[in-house]
Image (spheres, rainbow, N blue to C red):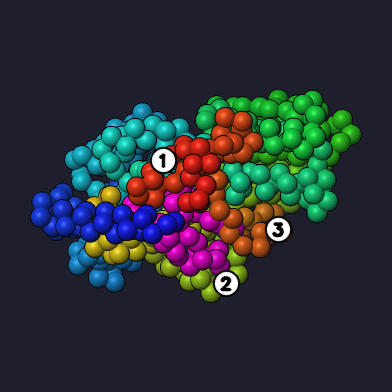
Amino acid sequence: MGFKSIGWRKLTLAGAVAGLALAGGPAAAEDTIKVGVLHSLSGTMAISETTLKDTILMMVDDLNKKGGLLGKKVEAVVVDPASNWPLFAEKARELISRDHVAAVFGCWTSVSRKSVLPVFEELNGLLFYPVQYEGEESSKNVFYTGAAPNQQAIPAVEYLMSKEGGSVKRWVLAGTDYVYPRTTNKILEAFLLSKGVKKEDIMINYTPFGHSDWQTIVAEIKRFASAGKKTAVVSTINGDANVPFYKELGNQGIKATDIPVVAFSVGEEELAGIDTKPLVGHLAAWNYFMSVNNPDNKAFIKQWQTYIKNPKRVTNDPMEAHYIGFKMWTQAVLQAGTTDVDAVRQAMYGQKVKSPSGYDIVMNTNHHLSKPVMIGEIQANGQFEIVWQTKGPIKAQAWSPYIPESAKLTADWTFPWVCGNCTAPKYKSYQ
């Protein structure tokens, strides 16, 4: 970033702070600083999202015990969009317009994020989105703290293709029928074809949210894998449909040594409701696992279990993403000296948090993080043994190089060069 960019950034921050001090604003006028919590507490996604609500409440509680933020108490405004995608947009509008929240932490599925995106852009709100997703998006009003495809899906497939991962030759791309699985599988299919995998060696299947009858589909997977080539399932199945899916794998005697499954939406929380003994050896790809062994993770686990008053409650990757996002937001607010969205957004770039994963995580100007990639193997106790990981954090790609229309796109929200889908040559020097 050149001298001109730094100068404009300072002017922007100074102007924003000065303007807020003179004119006031909803967040400044209140006795408390409000943050929105937009997660499904009922419906098919409650199995995953309820814990994320509790994570933000834990972070708010911890912050208030330390004196709050900018001399004010922080208040969490919790709403339940009930796994209803249009309702997410309605609740988001209420949080920003009625409750005047300074930022919102929420959503799990990409369809819920797509639902609220126009609202955040119209009202200039700020969303921290904590879950792995399909990429192909960059908004100045969203900070994506989960993994992009090059931080989860692509490394997981590369691992399975390697000798260490079993030299897989045939692929089942199984997902829930909505934007995240379909776009991720479009990227994965293009990636596999670029690696010489034949079209007939790729099976793609989609099921609706909450799907429960897996007998026929699992049987089809079994038949597909009987062709004599090593086969793996890449799962983008979301929500409570994972419980009967994994149960049916066990019912049909499918072991990880026969057909390994690598999941992108199954973590410790989802496994807590499943008998994991028949699933030992199956895999998940994330940027964090509870089994990471370092002092920061031990402190994170202790903080969570103490807050939730349950020594058996697990942690997982999206929880860590919310932990990172909330910490970065508070640091940015302190740096900007205000909760004004425009000032906080500029202060977010370059924010660094020592994460429970054991790495310094950095926010980039494309509104995505640099994060490590880990492959975990399911254990009988419901935890994951980390069998592979990158040497360090990988910078997220907002746009996939494996989709032709995206290959030349990049994102850089550094003022005054702001663009979510700019062509790479014009902005190359600022990446």
- Which residue is denoted by mark 3 in the rendering? 388
Q: Amino acid at mark 3?
A: Trp
Label 1 to label 2: alpha-carbon separation: 38 Å
The kind of secondary structure element at disc 2 is loop
Q: Amino acid at mark 2?
A: Asn
Neighbour tally class for label 1: few under 14, some 14-19, many 20 plus, Cα within 10 Å: some
Q: Quadrant of the N terminus?
A: bottom left
- Answer with mark 1 or mark 2, whichever residue precedes in sequence: 2
Residue at 72% in and 59% down:
387
Q: What x and y, as percent, mark residue 317?
A: 53, 54
- Which residue is denoted by mark 1 in the rendering? 419
Neighbour tally class for label 3: few under 14, some 14-19, many 20 plus, Cα within 10 Å: some
Q: Is residue 21 magenta?
A: no
Q: Does residue 27 appear anywhere in the picture?
A: yes
Label 1 to label 3: alpha-carbon separation: 35 Å
Residues rendered magenta in the picture: 345-372
